[in-house]
Image (cartoon, grey):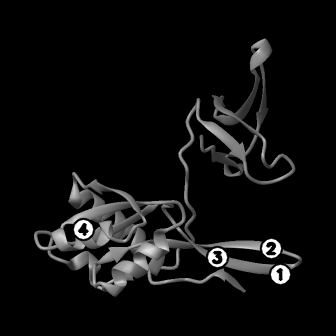
Amino acid sequence: MPLLRRELDLSPDDFFELDAASFPWGVAHVRSRQEKLLARHLAERGVPFYLPQFASKSIRSGRTFTSWLPLFPGYLFFRGDASARDAVRRSNVVANTIEVGDAELLAAQLRQIRELQLAGASMQPYDALVAGDPVRIRDGAFAGYTGIVEREKGHDRLVVMVALINRAVSVEFERHVLAKRKH
């Protein structure tokens, strides 16, 4: 049963073949959970865009639910001239646009992601965690606990600090249960 249905993720079908001079690359950084709204807005106005999505499955009361979520939360890739950029800004869901320095590199990376999707690859967002990152445990018995990532002998550890006495404890967790904590 779908919770969030799959929506249009690429428009037009020849998005990656568009002329770079006529359709320069842009990246929209959208307000929280507004990626699909921007995609619908751009589709209505004929602005080329790519919003890669992945299937997120959850089980509740023995039933499996599927939601289609953005692979890169907060971002949508688009192509177009000044009028396309104006349509992006007028959507009222964009926090800012990001200038693309190396358009060829971005195109190659996104094309590879699209080809993997079309080949049926199961993709999941991957948050690069480095030592010092504040994190939250997202799954399991310890879900909701927060701390700082520490790398020790190739393992990720959650460090929980008691600031008042300047002492800490560390607990080892699998990387997939850790998520970057929003400040």
The answer for how far apart the CA atoms under marks 2 and 3 are is 11 Å
Which sits in the foreground, 93 or 179?
A: 93
Are the residues at dot 1 and dot 3 in contact (C-beta closer than 8 Å)?
Answer: no
Give the position of the N terminus as an image quadrant: bottom right
Rendered residue at 51%/72% (across/down) = 53
Residue type pointed to by label 3: Ser
Q: Is disc 3 placed on a helix, strand or loop?
A: strand
Q: Position of residue 59 (x, y in %)?
A: 80, 73
Are the residues at dot 2 and dot 1 in contact (C-beta closer than 8 Å)?
Answer: yes
Rendered residue at 10%/69% (across/down) = 21
Disc sitting over residue 59 in the figure: 2
Report whether residue 81 is seen: no
Disc sitting over residue 63 in the figure: 1
Report whether residue 173 is seen: yes
Nearest to the eye among marks 4 and 2: give it: 4
Residue type pointed to by label 2: Ile
Q: Which residue is mark 3?
A: 67
